[in-house]
Image (cartoon, grey):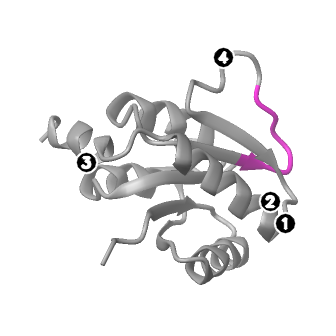
Amino acid sequence: MTAKPVILIVEDDELIRMLVAEILRENEFDVVEAANGGAAMVVVLKRPEIGCVFTDVRMPGEPDGFTLAKYVRRIRPDCPIVLTSGHARPQPGDLDQGTCFVSKPYSGSQLLTLINSVMATAPAGQAAASIARLQ
């Protein structure tokens, strides 16, 4: 049996986080949830099986989604990252290779298409190897 891909959802709005998690779980993903960037940083370090990070840009506290994306990229260069916001827009230099952006609101089908697309282009099996080097 093949393990389900693991997605980390970082969203401070609990209702949005629950909806995104439900959509992904219904479509054969394992989901890990974090309510802010600080909690997500801890999860990324402790969960090498995370295959994609889906994060809001604007959240209370530090880091915001853009800073979180750069942190994840530094320690997990092969992990796809999808940023989302209904207010903030990426500026030049905000999105590294392997990082993309989707505006809110998005549909469930848009979300699934985007997640499947970024997961398909990620180097298979390298996520756990890159985090293992840090420990």
Where residue 128 appears, as percent x and y from the top left, is 25, 48
For numbered disc 1, what is the local secondary structure? loop
**First to last magenta residue range:** 84-90
Q: Earlier in the sequence, mark 3 or mark 4?
A: 4
Where residue 11 appears, as percent x and y from the top left, is 62, 62
Where residue 66 appears, as percent x and y from the top left, is 61, 35
Distance from label 3 to label 4 (Cα)? Answer: 27 Å
Q: Does residue 87 belong to the magenta stretch?
A: yes
| Residue 105 visible somewhere in the drawing | yes
Where residue 130 appears, as percent x and y from the top left, is 25, 37
Q: Circle 3 is placed at which residue position? A: 128
Distance from label 1 to label 3 (Cα)? Answer: 30 Å
Q: What crowding class fits label 2: few (fewer than 14 Cα within 10 Å), some (14-19), or many (20 or more)?
A: few
Q: Seen in the image, is 13 located left or right of residue 70?
A: right
Comparing labels 3 and 4, the label whose residue is closer to the camera: 3
For numbered disc 4, what is the local secondary structure? loop
Q: Earlier in the sequence, mark 1 or mark 3?
A: 1
Distance from label 2 to label 3 (Cα)? Answer: 27 Å
Q: Circle 1 is placed at which residue position? A: 107
Which label is found at residue 132?
A: none
Q: Residue at x 72, y 72 (%)?
A: 16
Q: Type of residue at label 1?
A: Ser
Comparing labels 4 and 2, the label whose residue is closer to the camera: 2
Establish if 114 lies above or below 13.
Answer: above
Q: Type of residue at label 4?
A: Gly
Q: Circle 2 is placed at which residue position? A: 110
Q: Earlier in the sequence, mark 4 or mark 2?
A: 4
Q: Circle 4 is placed at which residue position? A: 93
Q: Type of residue at label 2?
A: Gln
